[in-house]
Amino acid sequence: MTTGATVWLTGLPSAGKTTIAHELAGLLRADGHRVEVLDGDEIREFISAGLGFSREDRHTNVQRIGFVAELLARNGVKALVPVIAPYADSRDAVRGRHEANATPYLEIHVATPVEVCSERDVKGLYAKQAAGELTGLTGVDDPYEQPEKPDLRIESQNQTVQESAAAVHALLSERSLL
Ligand SMILES: Nc1ncnc2c1ncn2[C@@H]1O[C@H](COP(=O)(O)OS(=O)(=O)O)[C@@H](OP(=O)(O)O)[C@H]1O
Ligand SMILES: Nc1ncnc2c1ncn2[C@@H]1O[C@H](COP(=O)(O)OP(=O)(O)O)[C@@H](O)[C@H]1O
């Protein structure tokens, strides 16, 4: 069986988490790996239905996703997780669960500056916040605690999508996870 691993892509809305996850998924599938992308929006529609964006709900959401990712990774799947996960203690708890099960875990900080994210504004959330139609947007009027020691930091504003995905792929290779 191939080595499973969780690859958590944390960062602001529009940082590039989802795009990099899908690009990486393509690279890994081409190599014959089993891959699942645990997309934040999809998870919120199903296993986290009813949760909002309070600190408590975000923590619960992240723990649920971490639980599922660890189960998949423990069983040989590359679980790619493009989820904001704004709080360091939530991320640490997920890492701890993986360590307790000796399941490989990589934290990737997609560190696109908020100015670039709000320019991209893929889902129109930054515009809504600026128009007063939404409050509690991560990185604007809600916290984002920067990862202090991520396994990799990606400056997506200076790279193509392919370069960003290749950097994560190279890290998996370096850690003997391919
Ligand atoms: N207030 C607020 N703050 C941040 N994000 C918001 C908010 N409201 C809706 N959204 C959209 O929700 C998407 C999924 O969020 P996540 O589950 O990744 O967030 S969290 O980890 O639970 O904080 C997240 O997806 P991405 O844009 O892909 O990051 C946002 O588009
Ligand atoms: N190096 C890069 N990596 C990822 N996305 C990038 C990069 N350069 C530009 N982009 C663009 O930024 C946007 C990121 O959107 P998305 O992946 O949905 O962000 P998130 O999932 O973090 O909210 C996409 O339109 C993508 O094409």
Image (cartoon, helix red, strand yellow):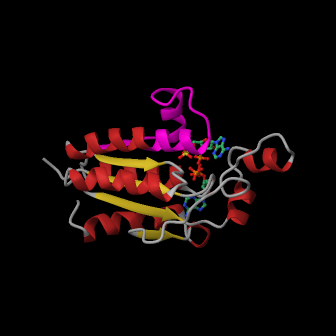
Q: Is residue 64 magenta?
A: no
The picture places residue 76, in percent across and down from the top left corner, at 20, 45
Q: Is residue 103 visible?
A: no
- Provide residue 159's location: percent of width, then percent of height: 55, 70
Name the outermost residue toward the left: 1
Depth check, front residue: 89 or 123: 89
x 48%, y 39%: residue: 61
* Residue 149 seen in the figure: yes
Residue 57 in the magenta stretch? The answer is yes
Identify which residue is drawn at 20% across, 66% down: 176
- Say left or right for 46 vs 28: right
Image height of 94 relative to 115, above or below: above
Q: Is residue 111 left or right of residue 125?
A: left
Query: x and y percent of residue 77 in the render?
Result: 26, 45
View quadrant of ligand 2: bottom right
> Residue 8 placed where, x, y %?
41, 54
In the rendered structure, which segment of residues is drawn in magenta? 35-62
Total number of numbered discs in the rendering: 0
Q: In this rendering, is residue 17 above or below 135?
A: below
Viewport quadrant of the C terminus: bottom left
Residue at x 26% of width, y 40% of height: 71
Residue 79 left/right relative to 113: left
The residue lying furthest to the right in this view is 131
**Closer to the camera, 83 or 60?**
60
